[in-house]
Image: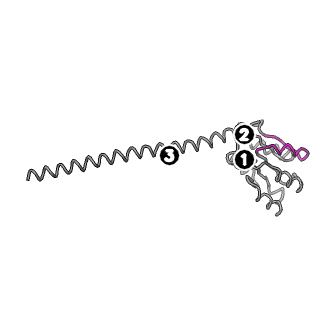
Amino acid sequence: MDKLLEKILQLLQIFYSARDCITAICSVFGFIALLVVAAGSFAGITQALIRFGLALFAKKIAIIAGLDDFNDIRKDLVNSGLIKTRNIQHVTNKHLDEAQSALLMIIVHGYLSNEEFNAVVRGKKPQCGLIVYCPPEKGRIDEQGMKLLSMISFTALCNFRGRMVNDVLLMMLSTSFKGKDIN
């Protein structure tokens, strides 16, 4: 009987030491997996934060609009507390070539003729964000304009000023922007 108990105790010791080994191995693998996931998450978030920080610091926003609309939009952007006045540029229909170098454009619908609008939209850089602000009092964009906008990358259409501020911030994050883009 004592020998049987001894055998059972030996088996239990082997079982517990095997369980302890498996637990230790799983703990090590779990810790390594946690480090890998944390590092990957941190790297992705850090890249987005750096890109967004650079955009807020230096990305020029070209606003193609009449003076009243420009002043309203500029005030909304500056009041957000994230965008500096020095990063906002007014572009009139007499100097549309200035907008071609922009990395983010806002066009107020109805300010440009259809030909000017088409030229600006088609001439923008691929990495340039484009927001068309179309308030209800300015009318609707025609079907041809909508088709053109749907073919161009990084475009947004909004009809409320508050939504436009959100679109500007999202566009800054989503469009390609690196330190080399700072002029």
Query: Quick one: label 1, few (<14), some, or many (20+) residues within 10 Å?
Result: many
Badge 1 or badge 2: first in the primary sequence: 2
Please give the residue where the numbered disc 1 appears in the rendered image: 168
Residue 92 part of the magenta segment: yes
Mark toward the viewer: 3 or 1: 3
Tell me, yes or no, if residue 31 can be seen here.
yes
Mark 3–mark 2 Cα distance, whole angstroms, equals: 33 Å
Query: Relative to residue 12, is residue 123 drawn left or right?
Result: right
Q: Three-letter amino acid code at disc 1?
A: Val
Badge 3 or badge 2: first in the primary sequence: 3
Q: Residue at x 11, y 53 (%)?
A: 4
For the C terminus, the image quarter is: top right
Mark 3–mark 1 Cα distance, whole angstroms, equals: 31 Å
Please give the residue where the numbered disc 2 appears in the rendered image: 83
Please give the residue where the numbered disc 3 appears in the rendered image: 37
Query: Quick one: label 3, few (<14), some, or many (20+) residues within 10 Å?
Result: few
Query: Relative to residue 63, is residue 10 drawn left or right?
Result: left
Please state the extent of the stretch shown in magenta in the rendering: 88-103
**Which residue occupies the extreme left position in the image?**
1
Badge 3 or badge 1: first in the primary sequence: 3
Q: Where is residue 131 in the image (x, y as percent from the top left)?
A: 76, 51
Q: Three-letter amino acid code at disc 3?
A: Val
Circles 1 and 2: CB atoms closer than 8 Å: yes
Q: Position of residue 53 (x, y in %)?
A: 66, 39
Mark 1–mark 2 Cα distance, whole angstroms, equals: 10 Å
